[in-house]
Image (cartoon, grey):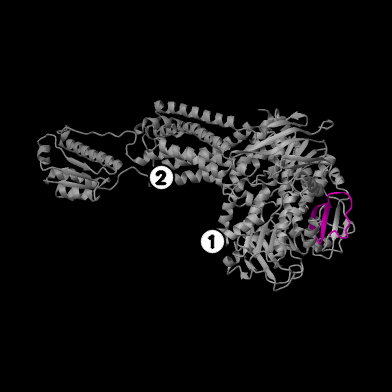
Amino acid sequence: MNTVALRRLSGLLRKESLQIWRDPSALAIAFVLPAVLLLIFGYGVSLDARNVPIALVVQQPSALAASFTSQFARSPFFRPRRFLTIQDAEQAMTAQQVQGIVWLPSDFTRRAEAGGNSPIGVIVNGVDANDARIVEGYVQQVWAAWLTARAQLAGGRAPLPLSVQPQVRFNPAVDSRDYLVPGLIAVIMTLTGALLTALVIAREWERGTMEALMVTRVTMREILLAKLIPYFVLGMGGMAASVAIAVFLFGVPLEGSVWVLTAASGLFMLTALGMGLVISSVARNQFVAGQIAIITTFLPAFLLSGFVFDINSMPRVVQVITHIVAARYFVAILQSVFLAGNVWSVILPNAFALAVMAAIFLGLARAITHKRLD
Amino acid sequence: MPDTDPKPAVRLAGVRRGFRAGKRVVTALDGITAEAARGAVTGLVGPDGAGKTTLMRLIAGLLRPDAGRIEVLGIDVARDPLSVQARLGYMPQRFGLYEDLSVAENLDLYADLQGVPPDRRPERYAELLHMTGLGPFTGRMAGRLSGGMKQKLGLACTLVHPPDLLLLDEPTVGVDPVSRRDLWQIIDHLTREAQVTVLFSTAYLDEAERCDSVMLIHEGRLLGHGPPGQFTAEMAGRSFFATASLGRRRLQACLAAVPGVIDAVIQGSRVRVVTAEAEPPVAAGLVVEAPDLVLTPTPPRFEDSFVARLRARDGLVPPAALTPALPLAGEGGVRVPGMSRAASPQPSPASGRGGVAGDVIAVAHLTRRFGAFVAVDDVSFTVARGEIFGLLGANGAGKSTTFRMLCGLLPPNSGTLRVAGFDLRTAAAPARGRIGYMAQKFSLYGDLSVAQNLRFFSSAYRLTGARQRARIAWAEAEFELGPMRDATARDLPLGFKQRLALACALMHEPDILFLDEPTSGVDPLARREFWRRINTLAEQGVTVLVTTHFMEEAEYCDRLVIMAQGAVLAAGEPEAIKQGARTAARPDPTMEDAFIAVIEAAPASARAA
């Protein structure tokens, strides 16, 4: 690039920066939109069960049974209610008053003290499958915790055979927010990145400035670069703000390195901006550009990135489709960097995929935008 | 670079370009072959939809022709658009100023884009700012400039690097006459001093006469090409001013029906007539109703030649074929039983002017503010029944705001408003029921057919049953829409769209008709036909209020006010306003001359256009 071309580019960059600074809409998309979405989703969407009403049926009270049931009373996850018979408890569950029943049969104490396997009955209301699975898991945790505590009390060796030993790694608090928020950042940055470029270019078409630009000596590559560079900076600013909210407000741990996070975010931001550029070459007014950006980038990122809905449990066809959703790779990287640390076996292949996607979208944008109106 | 190349600046050979509109292909340009000489101003003249913008974009290399060849400054545009663009200055119709950048920042941006070295900028900026008069405003945001100043800044931005060829796409549309005159001075200066070649497109036919050469385009075809003098020379000895004691509207209608008269338009108190032959017509006995008819020869205008060409192309349909479907009333006050509404025997508009009893619209001390900005400032006027009243002003003069308040869509901050006897502050809805409104832009449902649009608008005005059917039948007959009744409104030719819009506005037989720039950019024949209908309606007692920035439309008004910066600067009959601008050097001023005189006589605050 010679000096004249550099001057054109710097002129465009200065113009773009002035516009960003003076027109609050770009700043709003970059900072306010992610913050608002993060707050809404961060506080509103939680896959954790807390204060789940649960029925406790103890058929033959004993000290042992009491020490077990007191675990439920102390747990933040449950709000136990006592029932005398299993029939009463089942009725309560049918009436949706409790989500599950923990039932200590009459031989519970006898079998536990005999050192045999002492079974407890757990009945879970499966209407809300997600809740049901969570209740089941928590009950097992409580059970396991109780057994361990008893074993330690008994002096080292566990007199009882442990039937379950759940071990949660990479999210020690088992807080769903900790894995939702990093995924959410990916979804939000998809929207912000694509929306930023798509809208600002559509605005140039709407206001007739694009036509005036095109008849100057400026090349299409310069126009695209002048859009990419400032909005990359702005998007990364929004990204940093989102990470700050995640770490400082929601207390999500950041196990991995900030540099890995920055590099991966950079790759992802290029992909999102590339998508925005492609959209802007199709949509020449802001309304259409906004609609297309939401439908083609935000929704797939929300549904198919694996941030809420596990990709492995999707139908085969849908699983294949998720491979063209850039957010999928970024969600994987984010969840790993935030919760597990720099797991290179996760980061490198996903970063490579992001780089490929960025190259595809930016290349496509360059190929389909011409310095012509038709 | 000294331009001594004898080759033409632009050479068009068989240029053809179509656009896809749904399933149809619309031909925007159909075989244009023409040349534009270097160092001259070539006017691309034609009504809206003629293909002017498409041609500009083709020349700028923003579109490619379907067929034909375009050479700009000796370069084939299709092959090497970048080298053409390097030597071109192009100002699109809505020039893309960055509204949140200041005047200086806009100049800087375009200087960067056009590769003007920093050391040459101060001198160039000074020159441009002086030329455009923008010097005191360099720090102001472009979005806060007036319409005229925006156009000048747009021009300055295109000129930062002196171009060899300057393309200006309708730079004077909607601009106040003072700024328009300034723009033309800049263009003259550029061609004379800097030897820039200018291609200037316009729908204002009077601007053709300021060009060195004209390409007259209509419906994608070249109707004529040459110096404007050549166009007017063809019309020598064929144009006259007709005066008679007969009312001007009646006189115009009678003259238009005379065989051999190809054009008759009202101009002030007179009627301007153009004949098919150069032989002077004999005034005596030409119009039976006007035995005292006097014809005074007047120099031909460019528009005469356009009308003559259109008539020749259409097989010289005599205007008699356009005889109003309803008999015309004389201005003496004979009422017409054509419309079912009881035509009250009130004095006719011309004689009843200023009559208090006949005032259908009464506006007094109307003021509307938006924050600190005063959009309408103490405006007062009255409009009598059957009068055609104009609000003339540039974009941003306060016309639309006044209009919205008259429609009861916007409450005034102070002042009184009475429309059809209703106070709009308390009874906006009943007043609206008496108003028909025709918007400037086509505002019907493009996806519906003609008949469906008529049915929808008639039911929107609560017409039902036999009355609705009668009104639709009336509209189809009156506006000759019958053959088109199943056509989709979007696909109608411009003239038919306009007729349909007028028909829809008249479904409920309103007492008052509001027209928003009804004929700007329309070809002269369509404009004449439209105004013939409006005149007929006025004769029947319908009060017509027109807002326009188009000087020509002002001529059709009985009375008008000139607005600028929200205030009324002048009011009266067109002829009286024009006479006010009469000087020794300008014995017969045009409406535009009068407008400029009024603006310049106003205090400086009202002139900051």
The chain identifier of the residue carrying mark 2 reads A
- Up the image or down, A342 lies above or below B490; here it is above
Look at the image and tell me in which quarter the N terminus of chain B lies: top right
**Quarter of the image holding residue B68?**
top right
Amino acid type indicated by mark 1:
Gly
Residue B494 falls left or right of residue B607: left
Amino acid type indicated by mark 2:
Phe
Q: Residue at x 71, y 37 (%)?
A: B30
- Specify start and end residues of the magenta stretch as a single range: B260-286
**Quarter of the image holding residue A373?**
top right
Q: Position of residue A151 (x, y in %)?
A: 17, 35
Q: Position of residue A24 (x, y in %)?
A: 56, 47
Q: Nearer the viewer, residue A192 or B565?
A: B565
Specify whether residue A345 is painted magenta.
no
Q: Residue at x 20, y 36 (%)?
A: A148
Look at the image and tell me in which quarter the C terminus of chain B lies: bottom right
Q: Nearer the viewer, residue B346 or A317?
A: B346
Query: Label 2, on which residue?
Result: A41
* Nearer the camera: disc 2 or disc 1: 1
Q: Position of residue B605 (x, y in %)?
A: 74, 59
Query: Label 1, on which residue?
Result: B465
**Quarter of the image holding residue B83?**
top right
Q: Position of residue A362 (x, y in %)?
A: 55, 31
Q: Residue at x 22, y 34 (%)?
A: A164
